[in-house]
Amino acid sequence: MTFLKSVDSKFFLEKIPYKPMGKYVHFLTIRITESYPLFQTDGELNKARVRAGINNKNPISRLSMFKRKQSTPERLVGRELLRNYGFMKAEDCEYNVKFAMDNPDCIIYGFAIGDSGSEKSKVVVDTAFSITAFDESHETFTLNAPFENGTMTSKGENNSKPGEVTSRINQQDHIKPQVFFPSIVTLKDPTEANFLYVFNNILRTRHYGAQTTRTGRVRNELIGIIFADGEIVSNLRWTQAIYDILQAEEKLNIRDPLDEDDVVNSAEKAIENLMVEEFIVHSDFVGENFAELLQEVKSVIGNEEGLKQMLEKADNEAKEYAKVHIKGKAEDKGKAKTTSSKK
């Protein structure tokens, strides 16, 4: 059963391969903050000092969105769907606790359970960087913890002195809304079902960053898909190329946030220019060429019946792979140990 007509089937494998087959699909994604998310380590926002552009050699500090802060929320969204439609049981597969080893999440995104088995992730995500500089992209907030009466003044709660003003005040840096993180998500050796599974997870994921906060709203704007026989440019180089175009067109303004249409147009131009420099075989679906594919994908995953069929096919492929290459090999290894002990 095939789902897509706008993409040649030659880009997909019929089943999940055990060894790398040299097929790559790259999801060109612009991650756009829509609230005040936190991408931090040890209480501080992650940032890096890098060159502003490819042509502009001046160094600037950029916000960083580490790879796990991108892939983890997306695979968790996929796991929710698998449980919702009965393809996974919570008691059989719990993220970072117990892996069932035979569902789309485990096979596509990988797992490691010591001697029990492991599977390398087929989804590759690298650190993403903000287009604008760190100073323009974050804001410091003063946070407080009021009493139940809604004020910072005690009325004798918890043996405190009535009228005393609480000292429960803290400061935290937050990323501003409408900060843009260009990010390329790569899926190795895709089947059609796995391609749609990862595509769906990217489109559906809405929150990134610190999971303990009530903020973190991020929208993923896909601007294209590139099928290739190898990896393409890095997130940093793509971001720097976008920065150069925006600067040349005088679209960078320190006081105002970037306009989304300007970013998308610049991102498309930048990736097209960068792909001309590549020496791999590739087929690009960017801009108008991507519109038909995007609508076709949305028609599949936006329809409950189509979504269930896609999940079922992805689940069957994962179980077939696990039966032969994970559980089958584990059973053979166990039999070998038993035979050896008898000798």
Image (cartoon, rainbow, N blue to C red):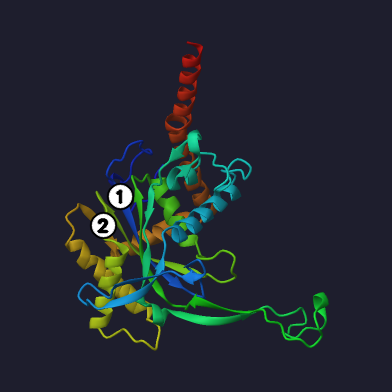
Asked whether residue 287 appears in the rendered view, the answer is no
Alpha-carbon neighbours of circle 1 within 10 Å: few (<14), some, or many (≥20)?
many
**Foreground pick, 157 / 91:** 157
Q: Find residue 244 and report its horizontal and vertical position in percent.
A: 24, 77
Which residue does the image show at 43% across and 40% down from the upper left? 119
Q: How many marks?
A: 2
Q: CA distance from mark 2 to mark 1?
A: 9 Å
Numbered badge on residue 45: none
- Dot 2 and dot 1 residues touching (CB under 8 Å): yes
Q: Find residue 44 and report its horizontal and vertical position in percent.
A: 48, 71
**Foreground pick, 37 / 59:** 59
Q: Is residue 76 left or right of residue 287?
A: right
Q: Find residue 24 and report its horizontal and vertical position in percent.
A: 30, 50
Question: In the displayed image of the protein, which residue is found farthest to the top?
Answer: 343
Looking at the rendered structure, the secondary structure element under dot 2 is loop
Q: Quadrant of residue 223?
A: bottom left
Could you tell me the amino acid type at mark 2?
Answer: Ile
Looking at the rendered structure, the secondary structure element under dot 1 is strand
Mark nearer the viewer, 2 or 1:
2
Could you tell me the amino acid type at mark 1?
Answer: Tyr
Is 271 placed above or below 101 here? below
Mark 2 or 1 closer to N-term? Answer: 1
Numbered badge on residue 232: 2
Alpha-carbon neighbours of circle 2 within 10 Å: few (<14), some, or many (≥20)?
many
Which residue does the image show at 39% across and 77% down from the upper left? 134
Which residue does the image show at 75% across and 79% down from the upper left? 147
**Foreground pick, 154 / 176:** 154
Is 250 placed above or below 340 here? below
> Residue under circle 1?
24
Is 56 placed above or below 41 here? below
